[in-house]
Image (spheres, rainbow, N blue to C red):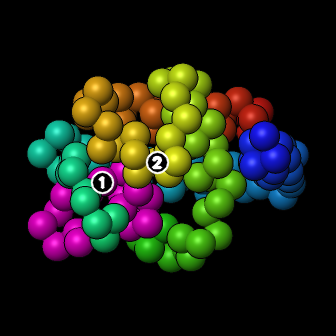
Amino acid sequence: MRTLRGFLFVLFLGCVSINAQRNYKQEIAILNTVDSLLADSAKWKKQDKYHYCDNSKGTYTLSCALIEAHDIKGLNPKKGKKLNWSIRKTIWQYRHKLYLHPITYFNTDKRNSFQDVKAIINLTKERLKELDGN
């Protein structure tokens, strides 16, 4: 019970501080780049056993596409925590399932298809546009 309370407290703190000083337009631009990297199902890599991004073949998992999009935009992927929280929240609402590592495990879940990954990207973009006021 103590661990669950600690997890919920950390989750609460993350949600409270997540909207402070956000650049929604930049996050939407990153998601647009992810969307273009995953333009069709041939570019999507479903299985990623080792969570290592080897993009030399032009295929990407959702998490590797996020890292690559940050690199393309000249940004540090470690600074993308707010965007990652938005994607995690969309995954939780979309699938109603808590994954240990939501972005990675959603990508490799047998029930999810390429259309599900695209839906997560588009739903997150819509949510960020609403938060931005556009």
Q: Is residue 116 left or right of residue 58?
A: right
Q: Are marks 1 and 2 in contact (CB under 8 Å)?
A: no
Q: Which residue is drawn at the image coordinates 64% and 70% (left, top)?
A: 79
Residue found farthest to the front: 1
List x then y, in percent, for residue 109. Answer: 32, 37
In the rendered structure, the answer to whether residue 97 lies left or right of residue 1 reads left
Real-space CA distance between mark 1 and mark 2, rounded to the nearest whole angstrom: 9 Å
Point out which mark residue 103 bears.
Answer: 2
* Residue 8 point in image, percent of width and height: 79, 42
Left or right? Give the position of 57 relative to 128.
Answer: left
**Pointer 1 or 2: first along the chain:** 1
Residue 61, numbered circle: 1
Quadrant in which the C terminus appears: top right
Q: Quadrant of residue 75?
A: bottom right
Decide which of 55, 125 is in the foreground and name it: 55
Q: Position of residue 33 (x, y in %)?
A: 41, 54
Q: Is 123 above or below relative to 19?
A: above
Local secondary structure at mark 2: helix
Foreground of the two, 50 or 80: 50
Q: Amino acid at mark 2?
A: Ile
* On screen, residue 112 above or below 61: above
Q: How many marks?
A: 2
